Image (cartoon, rainbow, N blue to C red):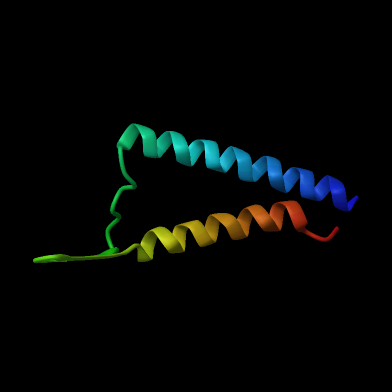
Amino acid sequence: MMMSQIGRFLIATGILLVILGALVSTLGHLPRLPGDIYVQRRGFVLYVPLVGSLLLSILLTALLNLFFARR
């Protein structure tokens, strides 16, 4: 039972990485979303992807709850 769940998790992680890799290769970079902090000064760049981190957290939480939900 536990090995089956680990297998599903690894498959889902692999699919997610393939999709993310395809997006990055087609866009050339990860998109900046509204709500992300981006500061550019002379010789200094700060990028804090707040919204992207929040979306990734929600997506991973939903996936993990699907695969590891106790029945």
Q: What is the quadrant of residue 35 in the picture?
A: bottom left
The foreground one among 57 and 42 is: 42
> At which x and y percent is residue 51?
37, 62
Residue furthest to the left: 42
Residue at the image position 44 percent from the left and 33 percent from the top: 22
Residue at the image position 61 percent from the left and 60 percent from the top: 61
> At which x and y percent is residue 6?
78, 49
Left or right side of 19 for 27 = left
> At which x and y percent is residue 9?
71, 48
Residue furthest to the front: 43
Residue 39 visible in the snapshot = no
Residue furthest to the right: 1
Residue 61 visible in the snapshot = yes
Placement of 30 over or under 56, stated as above or below: above
Residue at the image position 86 percent from the left and 48 percent from the top: 3
Placement of 20 over or under 54, stated as above or below: above
The foreground one among 15 and 43 is: 43
Q: Which quadrant would the C terminus be assigned to in this image?
A: bottom right
Left or right side of 34 for 68 = right
Residue at the image position 29 percent from the left and 63 percent from the top: 36
